[in-house]
Image (cartoon, rainbow, N blue to C red):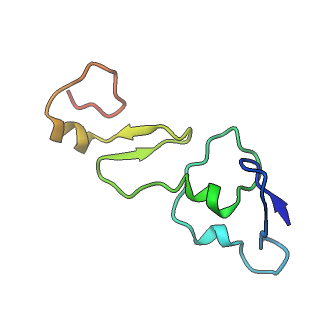
Amino acid sequence: MKTCERCHKSFSCGAGSTGSPCWCTELPAVSVPKNFKDCLCPDCLKLFVKPESEDFYLDENGNTVFTEAYHKKRGYCCNSNCRHCPY
């Protein structure tokens, strides 16, 4: 059993104990903030699943980053020094 670093609930981790990969390898890409150094439970890890979108993604710190496609749809620069601003 492991203890979730975020919520402190106990949960089962399959890595190494059964010879098969852990349940977390079945999740889509995740972006867990760097302050977490150990495993998270299923409920907490699902909070960091990267959404599939052409408009934004979550960076390695969990921040929403708008894509160039989003900025082009919006049609103008907001002067916020956005990472992918084409204007």
* Residue drawn 23% across the image and 44% down it: 69
Is 57 located above or below residue 82 in the figure? below
Q: Is residue 80 left or right of residue 76?
A: right
67 in relation to 79, above or below: below
Q: On the image, which quarter does residue 15 sit in?
A: bottom right
Q: Please identify the residue farthest to the top as the structure is shown.
A: 79
What residue is rendered at 53% in x and 41% in y? 62
Q: Position of residue 54 (x, y in %)?
A: 29, 52
Q: Nearer the viewer, residue 86 or 47?
A: 47
Task: Place residue 73 in its image quadrant.
Answer: top left
Closest to the observer, 42 or 16: 42
Q: Position of residue 43 (x, y in %)?
A: 63, 60
Q: Quadrant of residue 39?
A: bottom right
Q: Quadrant of the C terminus?
A: top left
Q: Position of residue 65 (x, y in %)?
A: 39, 38
- Residue at 23 percent across and 32 percent down: it is 86
Question: The N terminus lies in which quarter of the figure?
Answer: bottom right
| Left or right, residue 50 beside residue 26 | left
Residue 51 x %, y %: 42, 55
Count all numbered tags in the image, as a single digit.
Answer: 0
Give 11 or 22, whichever is nearer the viewer: 11
Which residue: 55% across, 52% down? 48
| In the depicted structure, whether residue 11 falls above or below residue 17 | above
